[in-house]
Amino acid sequence: MHPNDISADRSAIRDLLANARRIAIVGISPKPQRPSNAVARYLRDAGYTIIPVNPAWDEVLGEKCYPSVREAPGPIDIVDVFRNPDEVMEVAEDAIAAGAGCLWMQLGVIAPEAAQRAAEAGLKVVMNRCTEVEHMALGRQG
């Protein structure tokens, strides 16, 4: 495991979420019942600036939606990925090009090659964890 892969380091995840301000939600859906939409709403309500990323939509949750992370305005602290694992390498390359701080793959999104590429480029990496669940755990750890 690369030192930048903080997936198993609860303290590092806590620090990442405590210091992040802007989170790109890649693969966001306008449908309220979709996990990407629910997590984005939660993060926005928790005080983060969300940046919707999905080429299929112009606007989600009242925010301009960008076709890719490369085209989204920076800085981006976390790129939160709701995509199939075989689509994550492209997102990782975009996150690297955009100078993002972290590539975060949601529960069920396991893409070791993309994680390795992002980590080697200097991004923090979290894989197979939910930003909402981890943020809620912060409140319990106080």
Image (cartoon, helix red, strand yellow):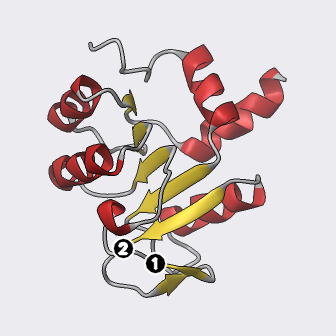
Tell me the amino acid under the disc marked 2: Asn
Q: CA gap, disc 1 to disc 2?
A: 6 Å
The numbered mark, 1 or 2, whose residue comes first in the sequence reads: 2
In-image side of 71 versus 21 (left or right):
left
Q: Residue at x 50, y 85 (%)?
A: 59
Q: Residue at x 56, y 73 (%)?
A: 33
Do labels 1 and 2 touch, CB within 8 Å? yes
Image quarter of the C terminus? top right
**Image mark for residue 65:** 1
Q: Residue at x 26, y 34 (%)?
A: 118
- Kindly state the secondary structure of the residue where label 2 is placed: loop
Nearest to the observer: residue 46 or residue 51? 51
Q: How far from the left and from the top, in percent, is residue 132?
A: 62, 46
Q: Residue at x 47, y 36 (%)?
A: 129
Q: Which residue is mark 2?
A: 54
- Kindly state the secondary structure of the residue where label 1 is placed: loop
Q: How far from the left and from the top, in percent, is residue 2?
A: 28, 14
Disc 1 packing (10 Å; few <14; some 14–19; many ≥20): many
